[in-house]
Amino acid sequence: MFRRNKIYSINKKAANEALQNVFAACEQTPNTQSLDVLLFRNIANTTLVKAGKWMSVALMVLILLCPAVFYIEGQKAAPQPHKTDIRVLGHYLDEENKCFVMELSGTDIDYEGIYARKENGSVIYPVETDENGVVKFRFESGTLNIFIPDTEGGIVQAVLSK
């Protein structure tokens, strides 16, 4: 499939004579360095080039594999979505007490952690919470972001606007 270049072999004495004959034919000064020194330099130069080539290939492979390490670590550290069964069954405005009333269902509701945030950023807490799922907030107008946490760390957010 692949053809290799033919490799010729010649002994060192004949190679040195051939080199001197080439210099003489080209009317150049004869070579002052021995053939052994020239062969040694050639081997040293090609060894350095080969080593550099393989080092660059190895570094290229490492560079190409670097994003895979970050991808794998990101998959391990990615937060898994929290499943919660908290639901708002019903809600209404209690005009008499100026409260917003929600009826919640679900398991592991953290009733003490329920709070709401107004448009201006102030936090308000429920006026009343009932273990049966009833939560009341003081509310007259505007927008409330209501946060309902569970004991597992999940949060359900409800928005109320009037």
Image (cartoon, helix red, strand yellow):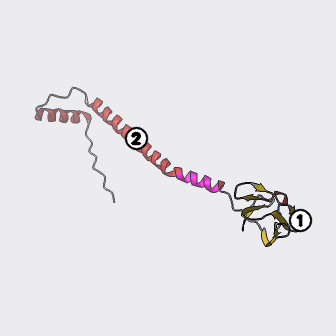
Q: Is residue 137 visible?
A: yes
Residue closest to the eye, 123 or 76: 123
| Residue at x 24%, y 27% (from the top left corner) | 33
Residue closest to the eye, 32 or 111: 111
Q: Is 77 on the left or on the right of 45, as rendered?
A: right
Name the residue beneath numbered marker 2.
52
State yes or no: residue 69 in magenta. Answer: yes
For residue 90, above or below residue 111: below
Mark 1 or mark 2, which is nearer the start of the sequence? 2
Q: Which residues are magenta?
A: 67-76
Q: Secondary structure at mark 2?
A: helix
Mark 2: few/some/many CA within 10 Å (<14, 14-19, 20+):
few
Q: Secondary structure at mark 1?
A: loop
Q: How many marks?
A: 2
Predominant secondary structure in magenta? helix
| Residue at x 32%, y 32% (from the top left corner) | 40
Quarter of the figure that contains the N terminus = bottom left
The disc label shown at residue 131, or none: 1
